[in-house]
Every structure is written in structure tokens, then in C-alpha cells.
Image: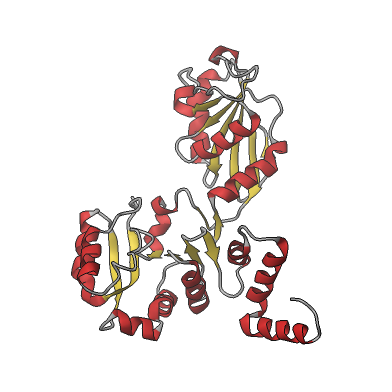
Amino acid sequence: MEFRSVADLNHDIVASLHKLPKDIDVVVGIARSGMLPASIIALALNSPLAEMRSFSTGKLLGTGGTRKSSRSNMTFDEVRHALIVDDSIHTGTSLQEARALLAPLAGRMKFTFCAIYAADATTVGDELTLVHLPQPRVFEWNVMHHPILNRACVDIDGVLCLDPTPAENDDGQAYLNFLREATARPIPTTRISELVTSRLEKYRPETEAWLKKHKIEYDKLVMLDLPSAEERRRLGAHASFKGQHYRKSTASIFIESELRQAEEIANISGKPVLSIEGPVMCYPGVSPASILYRIRGNVGPRQRALRLARRVIGAKRYEHAKALLKSKGVKA
């Protein structure tokens, strides 16, 4: 399962700008997913931006008041070469529809049709793809509205709603209030196969009521059947419960809120887990992406290297090696 975040998208586009034609007058995004990469390209090239359907009727978007250039006040009649952008290509349907919509303009300007991600990153005629990314794949910007949710296990707290605060998480009245009034995150518009949560089974009525209130569609709600939150903490049952269920299920992806749990679930299940914290895709065994996410931050190269060493060789062996070096007068 391949994954790209918004940060990955920006990086991949900037690294591929040299592949684009040099005479682009305007960047046109195919709504909606294509508008994100189109905006990144337009900003990088300091070019005018347009939305495809509006562009087909002769409209460009405003350019703002900064980074003025000779093209800032370009009119539609001056456009000679338009770059038509979508985030990815799979069946080619979106680009075919774009070609049909823009066909009446073919006599007055040149078009280059561009997809950022494709199973085969090549240039064929007026069709350009920038980055090779095989199927199956998911993107941060649309994963919660993608048909893949039909075969996914999805956590609730931190994914569908905000996590409870320590004060709210008392396994008592404050927690009941949280369950009833939890602040929703953006609601999925696609039916979810299974909601798999370490919320306790005794809170099923409140959980189901909240899901109904927010019109979240799902096939099954799987909850942890333990008597108390204290028992759940004692057993450390969060990730193990989710991982064991995911392993037995037919789901092809698990969406989890916390990176540490996501890594554990991936190792237990042997299947990929998307961590909202990051976001980053975790795989069974050592996950390079999650390692890099953990070690980056406002620390120097030496601290990052030490974090990476600790992560790769394990805490016990790292501390043993550190003590051994210290005994020999070497600072670690």
C-alpha cells in the first residue's frame, strides 16, 4: 500500500518541475483533487491558475498582490499553452473528460495534460506523468473520502473525533459527557467497513448515538470487551486488540490516530497501517517513514542520529552500547 502526504506531494512536484514544458502560460486544475497540485505548480512557476470548468468558459483565477510578473495580468485571450493537472491517473477517465471539455479551445491554444502520480511515469504525446507510484495507493488529501474505506478498519478517537483530554478520560461522568459531545473531525463521505476502537463495550450506546448523530456510515462497530479503563491500561490492550482483529479481517488498511499504536498494529497484523499522526504509513517490521517522522524536529544532526540509532537497534542495546563507550571515555 503506497501513501503520499501533502508534504510528499509538494516535495515530489518541486523535484519534478524540470519535467514540465518551459512555455506554460497557465496552470489549470481538475477539480477537486487536481486543484491542490495545480496550486503548488502555479506558485512554484509564478504562473496564473485556473479551475478547469471555469477555464473552459474563459475565466482565470486572480493572482493576488505579491510576486507580480509579466504574466500576472494575463488575460484568457493571451493564453497559448495551458497545463491541465490532476493528482493521479488510474483509469484515465478524468483526463478524458478534460480533453472533451476543452476540445472547443484546441484551435486557439496548446494543451499538456499532466498527472502527478501514475503507475508508469512517462510522457506520451501531450500527456505527462511525473512520479511512478504503483497501485494500491492512498493520499492524505482524500483518503477519508475514498472507496478504500469500504475495505478498511478505522479507529474512532483521533480519527473521526478529537481525542478526550486527560480530564475527560476518567471512565466516569466526564467521559460519558465526552462520548456524547465529542468534537467531530471531517466526516467521511464513504461507508466504512469496520470501526475498530479500544473504547469499552459498555460505552456502545453512547458511541452508536454519536455516530448516528454525525451520519457516519459503517458496517460493523468493534469495541473492547473489558470491565474498566484501568483494566485496559493494565493489560496494555489498545494496539494488541486492534492488531489481532485487523489480522483476522479481510481489511486491506487500518487507519489509526497514534503513530506508536500504528506501528504495533502493523507488526501484529502483518498489514499496513496509516497513522494520522504524521501522517505516515507504517508497515510490518522497521518502517523507514515512521522512523524519519520520529527523529525529525528541532534537534541537531547528532541528536537525530542518536534517535535513529536507538530506534533501529533497540533501547536496551543502545543503552548498553552507550555505557560501553562511556567506560572507554568516548562520549555518546
> Which one is in front, 139 or 73?
73
Q: Residue 106: percent from the left, percent from the top?
A: 57, 20
Q: Is residue 165 left or right of residue 172?
A: right
> Which one is in front, 295 or 106?
295
Quarter of image, res 230: bottom left
Q: Residue 3: percent from the left, percent from the top?
A: 55, 57
Instruction: Give the answer, above or below, for where 7 lies relative to 244.
Output: above
Q: Is residue 257 left or right of residue 316?
A: left
Instruction: Give the answer, above or below, for where 82 lies relative to 240.
Output: above
- Position of the C terminus, as image quadrant, is bottom right
Q: Is residue 196 left or right of residue 109?
A: left
Q: Residue 178: percent from the left, percent from the top?
A: 25, 63
Q: Residue 13: percent from the left, percent from the top?
A: 63, 42
Quarter of image, res 20: top right
> Which one is in front, 83 or 241?
241
Q: Is residue 58 left or right of residue 195?
A: right
Residue at left 35%, top 63%? 163
